[in-house]
Amino acid sequence: MCDLCENAIDRKTQPGSSRVKLWDMPRHYHCPIIGTCLSMGELKKIQRNSTLTLPPKPSDHQLHTGIVGQAEHNGAISHRVHKLLDKKYQRWVRSYGRLTTPETQRAFWRDALQAGDISGPFWALLSHQHSCRQLTDKALGDVHMLSHLQGASNRADLQRTASLAEQVEELENLLDEQRLQFEQKMARQETLLAAQKSALQSMQQRLTPATPPEQQLSQELAEERQNNNTLRRKQDWLVSQLALREQRLNELEYGNQGLLEQLREVQQERDAMERGLNQLLASQSPEATCRDDEEIDLEGKRLAYIGGRTTLYPHLKSYVETLNGELVIHDGGQEDNRADLCSSLSAADLVFCPVDCVSHDACLRVKKFCKQHQKTFVLLRSASLSAFSTGLRTLQETGDTPPSDSALLATLQ
């Protein structure tokens, strides 16, 4: 058995089954699973067919939070959600169930990320008993970051779409105005021609009363032909103007498609740059970071670190010791006893919590405890050594008073 298999998450399963029920999974799995794998329409259908109590006309966030809260209980709602996920993603569940090695499991998730279709593979991976801990942590982290990137991308697309919609509306309004002006002009010309024709006929009758009927009809026919030719030329001109405007509208639509393609290319370049930056930060050694932070002296203070990744714990401890401090680590209740969390916080002078690698419940409990006991509480943007070092430097610059970060707090509500 390899090291990755030995680190597989200990989850409750039915005897003889390789799958894990939704209510037997860790609580911090429920929010990303329900938010990624189910649409709002499916959540509304589950709520209508259940006894879940929500405010009248609940918002999308209230509906999502209510069903996530019921997912940890072995009840009707969690059973209905689990059954819907298995039915919706049965193809991926079967495909993933046939994988027998950690290498093939990692390739399965990597292919899903590259294809951009992660909902089915994400459910299959997290609901399988033999998924290794490192792979599930990576999948949870990838989904968490994709939600941020997708939000920023959607805002840019909406702004561009709104701008194009305004241009199309302006062109349509201009076209309507020109059509109305043309119709009014044609009506005036017809009225004027009718009046001129009537006046000419009256004058001809007075001047040449003896004009034969055949000659009079011939003159009227010539006049009608001339008027018809004039109107036809005007009609041809208007048709050509309409064709030019339709061509312009088509050009704008093609331009919009080109801009969308450019947007996708820029997003791909941005993703590649972010992956390179993460690899560069991960390759930094604790000793190199310590050289940048030689001016920091913790003066024997005890720091508490809640959550994060277990692979970084030794590096964090070594780093804090080089700064004349002591670090107490608690994983937020995943493997460590939750009862020990309060004792770890009580003995700490400073408390750090990375928002990308800790459960919502644990982070909110730590925040509430620090507020009640007037302890300095620092939210870190990621569970990396560089983010921890940046948090320490910021505390020293601000005199142990953490700066407000509304964006990070909003992710915990």
Image (spheres, rainbow, N blue to C red):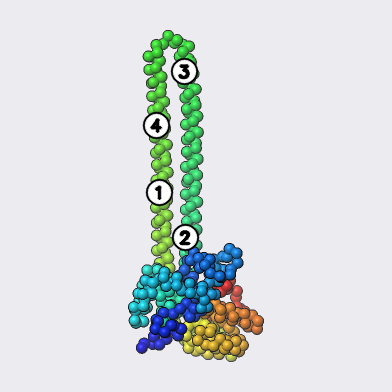
Question: CB under 8 Å between callouts 2 and 1?
Answer: no
| Residue at numbered disc 3 | 200
Q: Amino acid at mark 1?
A: Asn
Residue beneath the point at 46% across and 76% down: 140
The residue nearer to you, when weighing 238 against 50, is: 50
Q: Which mark is first along the chain, 1 or 2? A: 2
The location of residue 62, given as percent across then percent down, is 56, 68
Q: Amino acid at mark 4?
A: Arg
Packing grade of label 2 (10 A; few <14, some 14-19, many >=20) is few
Q: Secondary structure at mark 4?
A: helix
Estimate the spatial distance between the alpha carbons at disc 2 and disc 4, rounded to whole Å: 45 Å
Q: Secondary structure at mark 3?
A: helix
Q: Which mark is first along the chain, 1 or 3? A: 3
For residue 250, the mark is 1
Q: Amino acid at mark 2?
A: Asp
Camera sees residue 93: yes
Q: Which mark is first along the chain, 1 or 4? A: 4
The location of residue 291, given as percent across then percent down, is 49, 85
Packing grade of label 4 (10 A; few <14, some 14-19, many >=20) is few
Residue beneath the point at 56% across and 86% down: 338
Estimate the spatial distance between the alpha carbons at disc 3 and disc 1, rounded to whole Å: 48 Å
Q: Secondary structure at mark 1?
A: helix
| Residue at numbered disc 4 | 233
The location of residue 115, given as percent across then percent down, is 37, 68
Estimate the spatial distance between the alpha carbons at disc 3 and disc 4, rounded to whole Å: 24 Å
Estimate the spatial distance between the alpha carbons at disc 3 and disc 2, rounded to whole Å: 64 Å
